[in-house]
Amino acid sequence: MDSYFEKLGRTVLERWRQQNFSLEAFPELARIAIDEAPPSENVDLEEMVHEFLANDEQPFQSQSGFGQPELVAFNHPRFYIQILFWMEGTTDIHQHEFSGAFHVLQGSSIHTEFDFLGARSITPHLRIGDLQMKQIELLETGRTVPITSGRECIHSLFHLDTPSVTVVVRTHHDPGTGPQYNYLPPHIAIDPAYADALTLRRKQLLDVLETVDHPDYAKFVGEMVESLDFERGFNMLHHTMSRLQDLDEWEAVLATFQIRHGELAKGVPDTLAECLRRDSIAQMRYHIDDPDHRFFLALLMNVPTRKDIHALISERFPDQSPIETILSWAEELIEPTDFGLTLLDAAFPETLNVAIEAQSNLLIVALKYALKEGSESKPLTAELSVIHAALTASCLRPLFSEKH
């Protein structure tokens, strides 16, 4: 592997040894070592890739499925350095069982940090609380960010470029900092490593029933939810929500779960609705390649208010009006379907008898009105009101929100 990483690893090792291998000291120590000789200024990525492919003399490579792919550039019993490629990467909101620092070698990302307030453990693998955004920032090539293990560092990354490449200096495992929860906003934290074999098999069997369009699918799910504990019942709801909505049975099954668990289930409807919204945006990323459009998706997924969205657009495009930038992206993202035009997941209402040639302009007019907080001199027509409702019910909703 590139001699740069050997030198970086040895520098980190010697400095950490002087700190008696303190886990508390490691994140800042790693950040400083990286920033003294940033990989983005010292590593030729193409040359490094060629060397890795051609030279057998490499550090031990793990079997990790993390990254697309992960290359281990330096390995020591106490820590290692990994190079992570991200082709379609959008990380879950998560915490870590390791500490260190990461550096943007190539590309850019939206980085969001959170607090989980009022947390309460329901089982060792599921917690409830209130997930609130603490900070959001645009990470460009050359940025270095420390990683603290445990619940003090809850974050997510939405990679904007293909590929995005990060260098991570990290410990193998920090004892006592697990589980490595994933967070489902706004109210649930789950341990993704926990494997309940019976629940897994039940999900797989339900997938079979869905595939064959079994008439009792919703009945079977409802009976399970009525009898299962909170953790397994929530997992079943999460797994079956889309199918139950297609069958128009979602509200009935959700009500069964709420009756079964009372106050404990209060935050579940909002959490599952947000899961569906975020999954929808993540899926859009697979067929949207333009970095600016991906930036727009990242804002819609991670930024809860109009004000914060405008601030981040202004940071990335300081010479452009945020509203005009959004309208420009919207025009570029409108697509035809068999039933009319769509703007991301906002479909032009089928109830309106409007020729497809005229739909694009109406979508933009309704969006412009909403973005400008209804500042147009004329009130919305009945036609535009229906379109406005479709926009606010879609993943575009944060564009119109004033509250976290």
Image (cartoon, rainbow, N blue to C red):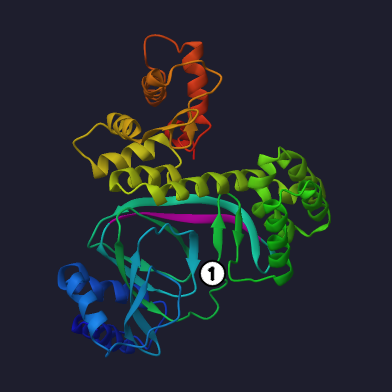
Determine whether 351 is above or below 186 in the image: above
Task: Name the spot of residue 213 as percent of width and height, x first.
Answer: 72, 48
Pick the residue in front: 67 or 333.
333
Task: Name the spot of residue 255 as percent of width and height, x first.
Answer: 77, 42
Q: Residue at x 35, y 47 (%)?
A: 294
Q: Describe residue 396's horizontal placement relative to residue 327 as left or right.
A: right
Check disc 1 and report the residue beneath it.
180
Instruction: Kindly report the secondary structure that dominates the magenta region of the rendered protein.
Output: strand
Rendered image quadrant of residue 2: bottom left
Instruction: Name the residue type under label 1.
Output: Gln
Determine whether 327 is above or below 241 in the image: above
Secondary element under disc 1, as helix, strand or loop, is loop
Any part of residue 109 in sight = yes
Q: Residue at x 39, y 18 (%)?
A: 358
In the rendered structure, does residue 109 fall within the stretch colored magenta?
Answer: yes
Q: Residue at x 81, y 45 (%)?
A: 259
In the rendered structure, does residue 130 fall within the stretch colored magenta?
Answer: no
Region in magenta: 108-120
Rendered image quadrant of residue 350: top right
Task: Name the spot of residue 365 as percent of width and height, x first.
Answer: 37, 20
